[in-house]
Image: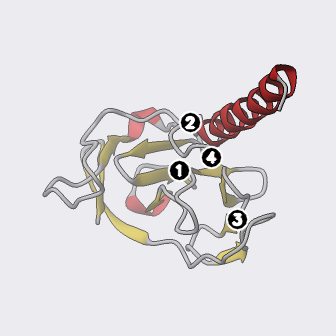
Amino acid sequence: MKRKEFVIKMGTGVLVACSGSCLLSACSPGDDGIQNTGENTGDGGNNGSKPSIDIGVIPEVGDQRKSGRVLFIRIDTGNSTSSFVALEAICPHQSGALVYVPDQQIVQCQLHAAQYELDGDVVRGPQNSSGSTRDLKVYTTALSGTTLTANT
């Protein structure tokens, strides 16, 4: 093999390898565009703490906030537990970040666009990907003052 051919073949291989890792990191579940509250950001309750938020951080219907592995969504006006939903924040298909799409009233995976109803039921499975998904976990909530806690 001549030197020029070797450099071209090796350069192409390196380019493909680097491009693949860049694409994978761009689709990682950590970049979901939802602000994490920094409050009780445990692992969804597995370490003894329960995810919670101050309801003041989601004042409008359709607002959402992630705490630990829980996605809190305001679904109604008022300040009672029935005004909020708490769902798992990570898609069960391949761990993509979940976000609420208010105009469609669905929760959608940022990785493969699987969609779920607010009660956790699957609306549409993963797109352009193999495999399937399951219903999302929906957590009961408790409100103490302005602190909303998910019972995980």
Q: Amino acid at mark 1?
A: Arg
Check the image and name the residue furthest to the front.
1
Q: Are marks 1 and 4 in contact (CB under 8 Å)?
A: yes
How many numbered tags mark residues here? Answer: 4
Which marked residue is nearer to the observer: mark 4 or mark 3? 3
Looking at the image, which residue is at 54% across and 46% down? 29
N-terminal of the two: label 4 or label 2?
A: 2
Q: Quadrant of the C terminus?
A: bottom left
CA separation, marks 4 and 3? Answer: 19 Å
Q: Which residue is mark 4?
A: 62
Q: Is residue 32 left or right of residue 37?
A: right
N-terminal of the two: label 4 or label 3?
A: 4
Q: Is residue 151 above or below residue 35?
A: below
N-terminal of the two: label 2 or label 1?
A: 2
Which marked residue is nearer to the observer: mark 3 or mark 1? 3
The image quadrant of residue 146 is top left
The image quadrant of residue 46 is bottom left
CA separation, marks 3 and 1? Answer: 21 Å
Looking at the image, which residue is at 61% across and 78% down? 121
Q: Is residue 93 left or right of residue 3?
A: left
Q: Is residue 85 above or below residue 132?
A: above
N-terminal of the two: label 2 or label 3?
A: 2
- Circle 2: is it few (<14), some (14-19), or many (20+) Cα within 10 Å? few
Q: Which residue is mark 3?
A: 114
N-terminal of the two: label 1 or label 4?
A: 4
Q: Secondary structure at mark 2?
A: loop
User: Which color scheme is applied?
Assistant: secondary structure
The one of 138 and 113 positioned closer to us in this rendering: 113
Q: Which residue is mark 1?
A: 74
